[in-house]
Amino acid sequence: TEILILKAVLFIEDHLVDSEVKAEQIADAVGMSRSYFSVCFKKCTGYSVNSYIRKERIALACRLLRENPQISAEQMAEKYFVKLFQQSMGIGFAEYKKQLKRQEF
């Protein structure tokens, strides 16, 4: 079980910027039922899945700030949003705006 939870932690690290990463998706990725996975995850890490994801996202933000102390919260949120938009829509934010402008004419 511990090996599967370690795999889950690695899965979470790989998908930190995916806002839609959910316990069910992670459980599926490691081959466990969602409820059993949640219990095992909490037992092994001391965190619920959602709390762990939040903690790791904050840690990522701290690392990004250490690398670039001048980055503002707005810039960090914008980078996150742009990546999230692309993943969700399958097209970049700027390209989507261009397509909208073309449709106006």
Image: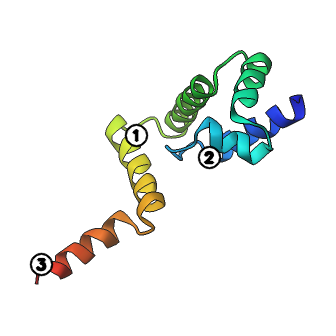
Name the residue: 53% across, 47% down: 18
Q: Secondary structure at mark 3?
A: helix
**69 left or right of 93?**
right
What's the residue type where badge 2 is placed?
His
Name the residue: 55% across, 39% down: 67
Residue 13 is at least partly visible in this image: no
| C-beta proximity under 8 Å, tags 2 and 1 | no
Q: Tag 1 or tag 2, which sits nearer the N-term?
A: 2
Name the residue: 18% across, 76% down: 101
Q: Which residue is mark 2?
A: 15
Q: Which residue is mark 3?
A: 104
Quadrant holding the C terminus: bottom left
- Point out residue 56 in the picture as x, y percentages from the top left corner: 60, 30
Name the residue: 74% across, 30% down: 37
Q: Which residue is mark 1?
A: 71
- Point out residue 25 in the picture as x, y percentages from the top left corner: 64, 44
**57 left or right of 103?**
right
Crowd around label 2: few <14 · some 14–19 · many ≥20 (10 Å): some
